[in-house]
């Protein structure tokens, strides 16, 4: 009888110990006990599972690198250790940490490049989210090796930074050339060079000139997409007649390029200030694109509507009125610009 009681007590003690041990393990593995802290792990080329474990243990993301290595080998995360970045925090358990790497949940930054952005805009956008430093993208866009790699005949990759929403791997932080390549590669995924060259040749342009024209259309056209094709027709008609394009957008880009564009205020003297982009003074297209155009603008550049229009003026509502003659253009300019702004100032004096 006494022997049975003793066995019973021993069994109870063992079960209690095991339960306590299991609860302790559960708490250690699944309940955060540390102060919250985030850490971005950079996996570099050649990093082993041991190297990754050491980095995670050092930053307090895991408590025991040996257990991490053991579990990592069991699930095969060694095969996933390619150059990349992952984001962790100290409230994650070891299984969550392993899951991030195993399922390649790389850390990315969402970046939106709006249609018509310039490389200067892109530089600001990326530096604002701390992926690059101010000026880095401008340097990368003008990198001779990168330009040569994509066979571009300009001194910059302006026009080829395809506007879209991107999820840029954080691994590319402070790697502006790699980031620029993401945009350029996207451009050439959307635009087949040989097909686009063929379309451009039908309207008297080559590949590069078509992209330049598209970049101007992007800046000048209004909201309705049909306007892009009308604006394109105006510029094509002017190019055929040897008339200056007279685009304010090109003038502004030339001023930006010389760091002379201040307060977003185009003044009359700007139109007579000569730069390679002043299409009021120079005939033909400017020397490079002036923005990064949308697919629709790229399409409009090589597929313009057939019109007799040579002029257009903004109606101040996102649309334009188009004219065949200069006299007609002057009439609309008076209505929609001179009189409109005169009335606007009078009505907003107080």
Image: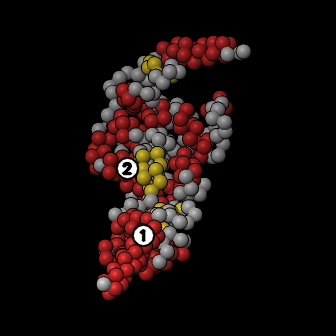
Badge 1 density bin: few <14, some 14–19, many ≥20, Cα 10 Å: few
User: Where residue 19 sits in the image (x, y, percent)?
Assistant: 39, 72
Can you identify the residue that label 1 sits on? 23
**Residue that appears at 44% across and 59% down:** 107
**Residue that appears at 48% across and 72% down:** 62
Mark 2 or 1: in front is 1
Relative to 178, residue 298 above or below: above
Nearer the N terminus, badge 2 or badge 1?
A: 1
Residue 332 visible somewhere in the drawing: yes
Left-right relation of 330 to 105: right
In the rendered structure, find residue 187 and report the number of the disc placed on it.
2
Left-right relation of 3 to 167: left
User: Where residue 324 sits in the image (x, y, percent)?
Assistant: 42, 18
SS category of the residue bearing label 1: helix
Image-quadrant location for residue 95: bottom left
**Residue pushed farthest front?**
1
The answer to which of 340 and 36 lies nearer the viewer is 36
Q: Quadrant of the C terminus?
A: top right
User: Where residue 312 sits in the image (x, y, percent)?
Assistant: 47, 23
Image-quadrant location for residue 24: bottom left
């Amino acid at each position: 009888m006494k022997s049975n009681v003793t066995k019973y007590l021993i069994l109870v003690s063992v079960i209690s110990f095991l339960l306590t041990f299991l609860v302790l393990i559960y708490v250690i593995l699944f309940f955060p006990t540390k102060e919250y802290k985030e850490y971005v792990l950079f996996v570099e080329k050649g990093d082993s599972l041991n190297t990754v474990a050491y980095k995670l243990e050092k930053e307090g993301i895991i408590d025991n690198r040996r257990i991490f290595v053991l579990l990592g080998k069991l699930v095969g995360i060694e095969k996933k250790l390619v150059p990349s970045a992952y984001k962790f925090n100290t409230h994650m358990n070891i299984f969550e940490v392993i899951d991030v790497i195993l399922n390649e949940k790389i850390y990315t930054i969402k970046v939106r490049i709006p249609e018509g952005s310039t490389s200067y805009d892109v530089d600001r956008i990326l530096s604002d989210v701390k992926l690059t430093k101010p000026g880095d993208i401008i340097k990368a866009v003008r990198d001779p090796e990168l330009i040569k790699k994509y066979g571009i005949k300009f001194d910059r990759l302006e026009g080829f930074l395809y506007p879209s929403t991107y999820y840029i791997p954080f691994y590319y932080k402070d790697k502006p050339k790699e980031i620029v390549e993401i945009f350029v590669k996207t451009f050439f995924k959307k635009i087949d060079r040989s097909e686009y060259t063929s379309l451009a040749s039908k309207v008297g342009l080559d590949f590069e000139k078509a992209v330049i024209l598209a970049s101007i259309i992007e800046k000048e056209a209004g909201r309705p997409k049909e306007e892009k094709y009308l604006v394109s027709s105006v510029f094509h008609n002017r190019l055929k007649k040897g008339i200056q394009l007279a685009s304010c957008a090109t003038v502004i880009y030339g001023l930006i390029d010389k760091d002379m564009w201040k307060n977003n205020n185009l003044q009359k003297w700007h139109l007579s200030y000569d730069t390679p982009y002043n299409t009021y003074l120079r005939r033909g297209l400017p020397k490079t694109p002036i923005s990064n155009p949308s697919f629709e603008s790229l399409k409009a550049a090589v597929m313009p509507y057939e019109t007799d229009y040579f002029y257009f003026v903004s109606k101040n509502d996102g649309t334009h009125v188009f004219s065949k003659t200069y006299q007609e253009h002057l009439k609309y300019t008076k209505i929609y610009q001179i009189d409109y702004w005169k009335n606007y100032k009078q009505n907003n004096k107080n």
